[in-house]
Image: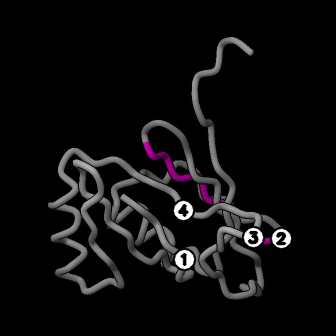
């Protein structure tokens, strides 16, 4: 296959549009490019600079609680973001006391934190 440019978007679900926007846009710096109401719920597109997150929020908020996908389960295990200054982002997260676990991996910092639906994101 030739001409691959990268990821266009990744589809996810959330039970809370406001918490999702606050987490990804206000805290991590993604840009909300589309917020559309439809009969089945709300659709959000968040631009991460090199691809987008498409997030569907059911109209009635009825989602089963998220959990970290085990190595023996199908599903997305985690998502990783790159920052110019990850330690600055870590500092901000410490200040607001969001659930987190900071680890040093190889020669870079890897920072795990919980998304609004309690699954983990990695930076």
Q: Are marks 2 and 4 in contact (CB under 8 Å)?
A: no
User: Mark 3 and mark 4: span between their CA atoms?
Assistant: 13 Å
User: Mark 2 and mark 4: span between their CA atoms?
Assistant: 26 Å
Q: Is residue 90 above or below residue 82?
A: below
Viewer-nearest of discs 3 and 2? 3
Secondary element at tag 3: loop
Q: Are marks 3 and 2 in contact (CB under 8 Å)?
A: no
Q: Is residue 12 above or below residue 22?
A: above
| Of residues 111 and 26, the one drawn nearer to the viewer in this rendering | 111
Q: Decide: few, some or many residues near mark 3? Use Cα within 10 Å; few <14, some 14-19, many ≥20.
A: few
Q: Decide: few, some or many residues near mark 2? Use Cα within 10 Å; few <14, some 14-19, many ≥20.
A: few
Q: Is residue 98 above or below residue 2?
A: below
For marks 2 and 4 on the same chain, the one whose residue lies earlier in the sequence = 2
Q: Please give the label number shown on residue 40.
A: 2
The residue labelled by disc 3 is: 73
Q: Quadrant of residue 13?
A: bottom right
User: Mark 1 and mark 3: span between their CA atoms?
Assistant: 14 Å
Residue that lies at the very extreme toward the top in this rendered image: 2
Viewer-nearest of discs 3 and 4? 3
- Give the magenta part as a residue range: 40-48
Q: Are marks 2 and 1 in contact (CB under 8 Å)?
A: no
The residue labelled by disc 4 is: 78
For marks 3 and 4 on the same chain, the one whose residue lies earlier in the sequence = 3
Q: What is the x, y in percent for residue 71?
A: 66, 68
Residue 74 on the magenta span: no
User: Mark 3 and mark 2: span between their CA atoms?
Assistant: 27 Å
For the point 60% across and 76% down, which residue is it? 68
């Amino acid at each position: 296959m030739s001409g691959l440019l990268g990821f266009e978007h990744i589809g996810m679900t959330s039970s809370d549009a406001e918490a999702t926007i606050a987490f990804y846009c206000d805290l991590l710096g993604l840009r909300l490019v589309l917020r559309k109401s439809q009969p089945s719920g709300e659709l959000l597109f968040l631009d991460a600079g090199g691809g987008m997150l498409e997030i569907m929020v059911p109209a009635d908020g009825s989602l089963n609680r998220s959990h970290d996908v085990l190595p023996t389960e199908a599903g997305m295990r985690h998502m990783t973001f790159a920052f110019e200054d990850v330690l600055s982002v870590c500092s901000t997260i410490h200040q607001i006391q969001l659930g987190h676990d900071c680890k040093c991996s190889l020669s870079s910092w890897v920072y795990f934190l919980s998304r609004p639906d309690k699954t983990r994101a990695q930076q």
